[in-house]
Amino acid sequence: MTNVGFIGLGAMGAPMAWNLDDAGFDLVVYNRTTDREQPFAEAGVSVADSPKHLTERVDVVCLIVSDGDAVQAVLERDLGILAGLDEETTVVQMSTIGYAETMAAAELVEEAGARFVDAPVSGTVGPAREGTLVGLASGPEGVVEEVRPVLEAMCDPVVHCGEVGQGTNMKLFINLLLGDAMGAFAEALVFGKANGLGVDDMLEVVENGALDCPLFEGKGALIADRDFDPRFPVDYQHKDLSLALDRAGDLGVPLSQTAAAREAFSAARGSGHGSEDMGAVIKPLEAVTDVTVEDD
């Protein structure tokens, strides 16, 4: 059985690591803040005292951290991943970061003699717990196939998107669409409520027409219940829209809808809702219109 290391035990990473343990992999974990390691230690999972010491003990290193700076730090820091690599190690980078940051990480790993798979995931905390994240893997086909059993312990399905960097591009594509759709949905709900429409009626119409989708069904119900516990926070959606706009700028692709959506999430962050679920993008609209979208 492959020895797997997992770095980053946050809201997404912890359930992903538990799924690897449940699948029977010989697991080693590391987190910068040690309190997140404690449940794993209590369950008998090995805990490393640095990324280097984790990397030296495993065949595959998975990492999911907050942003590109954190990825670079965990690779290059004193006793970081790069210090523990050899030619038999594969680094699977699962964080949502920019295209240039992905390519820079791949270059560092490959220069150290190891192999790199770019494999961000689509989904939130619920799918992370259930092992049903969508794995967006990219890299040499043979290397991706070698780590597929590891990815399939956390993801269903695993989509091979192409060469390194295409997994990141796919993640930016889907989160661009997610942010644009959520911003439009928030506006539509406030518009409907301002017109005196019932929230339940609006959601029923959406769910029984061409626009029916899990996003609108799930987020609509949560907004109506005023439940903004963070499944996918406003801050993260804002970050991902910014990354998509940066990449689009490099390519000369105009994204006017996405720019507007990013500013809607900027307004939510600026009014103190950055740590709340992305559905809180509706709150600045509600404040301006003195309308609250809630159960009738």
Image: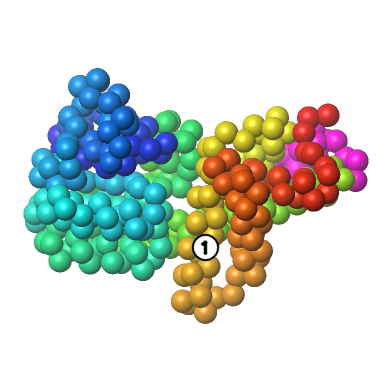
Residue sticking out furthest to the right:
196
133 shown above or below 19? below
- Residue type at mark 1 is Ser
Judge from the rendering whether residue 256 lies leftward or rightward of residue 25; answer left or right. right
Q: Residue at x 24, y 38 (%)?
A: 30
The spot of residue 235 in percent (x, y) is: 53, 50
Residue 286 in picture, x, y percent from top left: 77, 45
Along the viewing direction, whichever of 117 and 193 lies nearer the viewer: 193
The residue where tag 1 is placed is 242
Name of the residue lying farthest toward the bottom? 252
Figure coloring = rainbow
Is residue 59 rendered magenta in the image? no
Q: How many marks?
A: 1
Q: Quadrant of the C terminus?
A: top right
Instruction: Using residue 75 as the reference point, say whether residue 101 is left or right of it.
Output: right
Q: Is disc 1 surrounded by few (<14), some (14 to 19) or many (20+) residues within 10 Å?
A: some
Residue 280 visible in the shown view: yes
Which segment did they paint magenta? 195-212
Secondary structure category for the residue under label 1: helix
Q: Quadrant of the rendered structure where residue 27 is? A: top left
- Front residue of 226 and 196: 226
**Relative vertical location of residue 101 with respect to residue 95 in this rendering, above or below:** below
Residue 115 visible in this rendered orientation of the protein:
no
When asked about the image quadrant of residue 279, the answer is: top right
**Residue 10 placement (x, y as % from top left):** 38, 38
Q: Residue at x 28, y 58 (%)?
A: 72
